[in-house]
Amino acid sequence: MTKRPIVKILLFALLTAIALAAACSTTSEPPIGRDSAAIDVATFDFPESMVLGEIYAQALEAEGYEVERHIGLGPRELVMPILGQHHVDLVPEYVGTALHFASLGELEPSADRQRTRALLKEFLAQRDLTLLASAPGENQNGFAVTRELAERLDLDAISDLRRVDDDLVFGGPPECPQRLFCLQGLESVYNLGFERFLATDSGGPVTLSTLLAGEVDVALLFTTDPAIVRYDLVLLDDDRQLQPAENVTPVVRTELIEEHGPELAATINAVTRRLSTTQLRSLNGLLDSEATNLDSVAAGWLSRMGTG
């Protein structure tokens, strides 16, 4: 299948405001002169997703596959419709959020990884997408405060925020108000109503800096973020289990597996099974210390793991 240039696809997506209902459409646009031999690896626009995409890309190249990279392509609302329309081939996903997004909220993910994975696998199979092996490691949304604020307001769990939420500023990615596992869930599951929402980034340096500077009081950080330990932040306990299982799990076009055979899946799965939560946190720490040099971080990890 020939795929359109990604830049044109992105422009089309932005101009026409792709509906979420198209998230798993199997309809492809007419081909526009593009060599379809390469495997198109795409990622979301936050560092962990980006380095995972680079790791998978390098692992595939080491086995002789031609790869085109679309690293940091955008948020899920942009990337997954493009995969669903078969314009890219592989996206490292997280099972819980992927299930909620792909099914438009019709299928409920939970903390039960096997159940969540089974629901997602069946749903995607009907749309010519294949769910490959899930990693032992997962990265959930976490809600963090500074140690000083936690001690001053006696905060241990998310539900503790209910006593003081009217006076607190919440910081998170721009899409957070529309996300069940972000601000929507904090409102519906925990009945929280913050004084103000400040749009920052997807658990990245902007979010961290605003939290440390006191510009926000509560911030969405990923649970694999090494900054939580480095800056002695308090990750509030998700005592009402808002967050589902979020094991790293690549999604690929089924046609790609059919074209290349089981060896392709084996190459990808060999990487995935080494991704523990500790390894994810380590990768994120390396990105921080090496100025987001994705190539070297990915290559070094593959070498250490014996897969590159």
Image (tube, grey):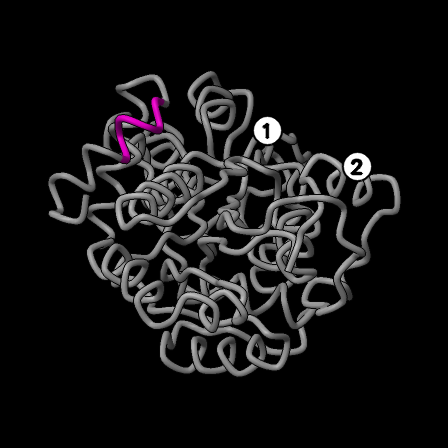
Question: In the rendered image, which residue does mark 2 sit on?
Answer: 11
How far across and how far down the image is residue 276, in percent? 22, 54
Q: Main secondary structure of the magenta part?
A: helix
Q: Is residue 297 magenta?
A: yes
How far across and how far down the image is residue 225, in percent? 33, 38
The residue positioned 41% from the left and 43% from the top of the image is 53
Which portion, as a residue range, is magenta?
293-298
Q: Left of 173 or right of it: where is 281?
A: left
Crowding near the residue tagged with mark 1, few <14, some 14–19, many ≥20 C-alpha atoms within 10 Å: many
Q: What element carries label 2?
A: helix
Q: Could you tell me which quadrant the N terminus lies in?
A: bottom right
What kind of residue is marked 1? Thr
Whether residue 107 is visible to the viewer of this picture, yes or no, is yes
Residue 76, above or below 205: below
Measure the alpha-carbon separation of dots 2 and 1: 24 Å
Quarter location, residue 140? bottom left
The residue positioned 41% from the left and 58% from the top of the image is 238
Q: Is residue 18 magenta?
A: no
Question: In the rendered image, which residue does mark 1 sit on?
Answer: 200
Q: Is tag 2's residue or tag 1's residue first in the polypeptide sequence? A: 2
Q: Left of 10 or right of it: where is 207?
A: left
The residue positioned 80% from the left and 56% from the top of the image is 30
Which of label 2 and label 1 is nearer to you? 2
Residue in the foreground of this view, choosing between 263 and 228: 263
Q: Could you tell me which quadrant the C terminus lies in?
A: top left
Q: What element carries label 1?
A: loop
Residue 155, above or below 140: above
Whether residue 184 is visible to the viewer of this picture, yes or no, is no
What kind of residue is marked 2? Leu
